[in-house]
Image (spheres, rainbow, N blue to C red):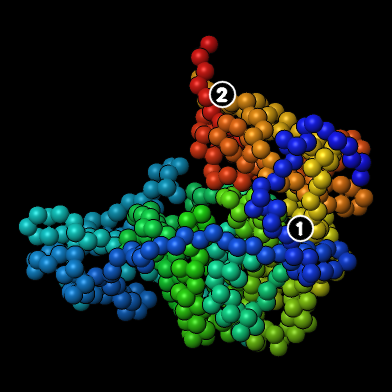
Amino acid sequence: MTKAASTYAPTVIRCLPDVEKKKTNTKDNLINTPGCVIPDFDMEFQTPKPKTKQSCGRRAVAIEKIDEHRVKFVIRRETMNAYMKSARFNCCYRYVTRSTYPGREDAEITYSTCVSFRNGTETTLEQEFINIICRCNRRKRVFYEDSYAIVKKIATPTRREKRPKWNVLIIGMDTMSRLRAMKTMPRTIEYLKRHQWLDFRGYNKTLFNRLSGFRTPPTHHYLRPLFLTGETSKGYLLCTKKLPSAIHILNYALDFVKSYANDSFFGFFWINSCSHNLNSLPTSIDSEFVNFLEKLSSVDVTKNTIVTFISDHGIRFGPTRQLLEAYYEERLPMFFMWVPEEFRNSEEEAYVHSKNNQYILTTPYDFHMTLWDILNKSGEPVTIPTSEACSRCASLFQSISRERTCTDAGVDEKWCTCHTMQEVDAHDVWAIESVDATIKHLQNTSKSLRTKKCTTCHDLRLARVSRVHFYTKRNQMYYVVVLYVSPENIGYEAVIEKSQYGYIIQKPVETISQYNKYGGCVSDPLDLMYCVCISVKCG
């Protein structure tokens, strides 16, 4: 590689001291196939250290499920006394439903008339979400409020097929790489290993972001209205009334699978409150999650249910993103899968393939094909379509070639982890020009954005470079740059291809700073990360 001195280099290619101390561990690899080698790596995760244990409060009212159609209210008097010592109070319940206002269906809720109840009152379960309010009789002020989610089973056809139908339960946890799960949820990981869950070490993310919200409920049961009754932050906890939001989800998931234990079901439950933000604490749910898995096993749900514990990506922003290891950590979300014993025996070849695929590059496209395959193996008359995003992707229960590359798996170069990166020399001309190409791309992007009236985006200028590394692939050179711009010290990570035609940005250039709060003037929310807004005189 051609190198030359430059007076521009010393002020640009300079990594931070804490970055230079960290080295990628290349003694071992996460996966090592002819098509893809992903180096093993290690890093520590910053976690808040609360002085006291956080709590959402204590539940003074329980709602017990009598059967599929009726519930009973139980007032725990001792706990209630902690909220109100007066002997005279009145409690009522009201049902919570989605708003019917066009465009606000996923953002607002409506309440039914509040109906009084006493300890032991039984009633028909009319809706899945219930909000309880208790008032002091004299002052009429609300001193206690709580919200509940209870599965109201929908009538399903009776099973008549002799062939076993495999259920699917997906438990997702936001922003959890495989490494972060191992570091912050050790009890859960030990449980998964002890019970022989599959661990897909080379599971690689493929896209930048997801769409959010639904105009109509995407499934028969949809938890969104519960959280719209009110979420509040208490330290590292995100609470929905008297329970952490994550515990609401796990409780509801367990209620769901128990309610449909004798039916075919598909369940998708996603937790982000314990892991998404920088002040989140995944460790806080470690024991609760093991408890959830043990309960799943105790009700025999796992006998005919394929269960996955997955994530979408690793940490996308914050101080750890300055580390080289963060490049891999962000792109390699966790993917663990439980395969029932009966499936292992009846689909022996498929299970062998899934075990082998733990050590091969895999993606969400493969998981999508796996869901189709499970449906097919359950005897459903389906024609499995070819993935539009990845024509060569396959079910994890099928043989996947060890020759598979990122291109084969539908992973753009921006997100590919099948390479080991090297540090650059401080005077590397190509590295310097890669930084320059990144800044020009950010500047051009910022200038092209549509903004609201009387605003525009500030000119972005290079403030500092945190790290620059390179790797080669198919005789092509790629640079990975992490830099910060002024004003407001916003960080970005870019992958740049050095070709005979110049420097090609592998889009997108992503921000590694926590949600740009300075870009509120842009017309398109997707442009937020590329703008620092300033006011201008209106013409």
Furthest-left residue in this view: 138
When asked about the image quadrant of residue 352, the answer is: bottom right
Dots 2, 1 in contact, CB < 8 A: no
Mark number for residue 193? none
Mark number for residue 456? 2
Quadrant position of the N terminus in the picture: top right
Left or right side of 396 for 239: left
Disc 2 marks which amino acid? Thr
Residue 120 locus on image (x, y percent): 20, 77
Task: Identify the residue at horizontal 59%, vertical 26% (top origin).
Answer: 458
Left or right side of 236 for 162: right
**Upstream in the sequence, badge 2 or badge 1?**
1
When asked about the image quadrant of residue 431, the answer is: top right
Position of 198 relative to 110 (above/below): below
Q: Badge 2: how crowded within 10 Å, few (<14), some, or many (20+)? A: many
Position of 87 relative to 483 (above/below): below
Residue 32 locus on image (x, y percent): 82, 69
Task: Identify the residue at horizontal 70%, vertical 28% (top origin).
Answer: 444
Q: Badge 1: how crowded within 10 Å, few (<14), some, or many (20+)? A: many
Nearest the viewer among 43 and 137 is 43
Task: Identify the residue at horizontal 47%, vertical 81% (top origin).
Answer: 295
Left or right side of 92 for 443: right
Disc 1 marks which amino acid? Thr
Residue 111 locus on image (x, y percent): 29, 54
Nearest the viewer among 276 and 462 is 462
Residue 150 locus on image (x, y percent): 37, 69
Task: Kindly report the distance in space between the C-alpha atoms of the residues bearing marks 2 and 1.
Answer: 36 Å
Residue under numbered circle 1:
417
Task: Identify the residue at horizontal 24%, vertical 73% (top origin).
Answer: 73
**Residue 191 visible (yes or no):** yes
**Residue 261 visible (yes or no):** no
Nearest the viewer among 162 and 221 is 221
